[in-house]
Image (tube, rainbow, N blue to C red):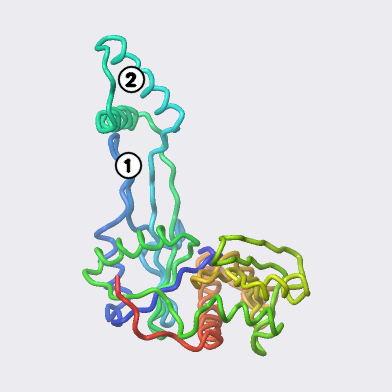
Amino acid sequence: MQWFKNLRIYRLTKPIRFTPETIAEKLAQHEFQPCGNLDPVKYGWTLPLGRHGSEFVHAANDYILIAAKRQEKIIPGALIKEQLENRLQEIRDEESRFVGRAERQTLKDEIIFSLLPKALAKSSFDFAYIDKQNSLLVVNTSSAKRAEELISALRESLGSLKLVPFSVQKTPAHVMTNWLRTGKINKRFELGEECELQAAKDGRVIRCKKQDLTAHEILNHLESGMLVSKVAITWNEAISCIIDDQLGIKRIKYEDAIQEKAKEQDAESAVEQMDIDFSIMTVELAAFINDLAKVFGGQAEETEEF
């Protein structure tokens, strides 16, 4: 089990009433299968504890860990381009005619199809957990596209999945900008030393690293109308991360206090250690997400489902 390093958070608008055992059974019906000769990509569920587990979920308290595997055939773009140019030249030489856009795309698709059987397959994993107590789905990715792919697969497996992106009452960019203006968030949060500023009018972007975020230089940019689009924060001296104006959370670092808590349990097996890590991580992240929602005015209730 990996400690989550990036978070895409979604709020369940209807509770998932299945037991962990039932969820495991449903995911098993959509188990990952490797790419065949002509499959460009395959996606399915795998064991969240890897070779140490035997079930398609790992449950601890009200948290349910799941994992998906994605396998994609990799064909170098340069190879496709080379073969396409060769084919276009053949047509020009043999038929003395121009190849239009639609035909060019058809030729490209045919080349990709012909290369698929010999292409190497690259695999990656997507982890997520269901927080039943707080009605959240938390995906370990910085990519909205990857999170949506997992959600689509989970919806297909469960038959129904009603959720919305995690949203808040106050505009994140305005709230984060005020943090830098005042140098304060609240008593459980501290500013880090990294931020990104954006100007809505002309698209200017300024990135600052290893900087005092309340320095006059940064305040001058804010006075000119720039807003904070990303900022480094630390919560409860336990979790450090970058948060952006879409409430994406990236580059999470779990401080020593959390790591030591996991090590103090004296696990007797790899599975037991994974269970301890997952239990500690989910409890800490639940508290972090709850406090984060509060500094943005609380969760917004009305958001369009997808």
Q: Foreground: 106 or 5?
A: 106
Q: Is residue 121 above or below residue 159?
A: above
Q: Amino acid at mark 2?
A: Leu
Residue underneath mark 2: 88
Residue 147 appears at what percent x and percent y?
A: 40, 62
Residue 150 appears at what percent x and percent y?
A: 36, 61
Residue 252 in sight: yes
Single out the mark in the foreground, 2 or 1. 2
Residue underneath mark 1: 35
Q: How many marks?
A: 2
If you read the primary sequence from the N terminus, does the residue marked by circle 2 or circle 1 appear first? Answer: 1
Q: Residues within 10 Å of mark 2 (few under 14, many from 20)?
A: some
Residue at the image point whose x is 69% and y is 70% from the top: 221
Per the rendering, the mark at residue 9 is none
Residue at the image point whose x is 36% and y is 29% from the top: 118
Q: Is residue 143 above or below residue 92?
A: below
The image quadrant that residue 155 belongs to is: bottom left
Residue at the image point whose x is 30% and y is 74% from the top: 305
What SS does tag 1 mark? loop
**Side of 99 where 235 appears, left or right:** right
Q: Residues within 10 Å of mark 1 (few under 14, many from 20)?
A: some
Q: Foreground: 300 or 119?
A: 300
Q: Foreground: 32 or 274?
A: 32
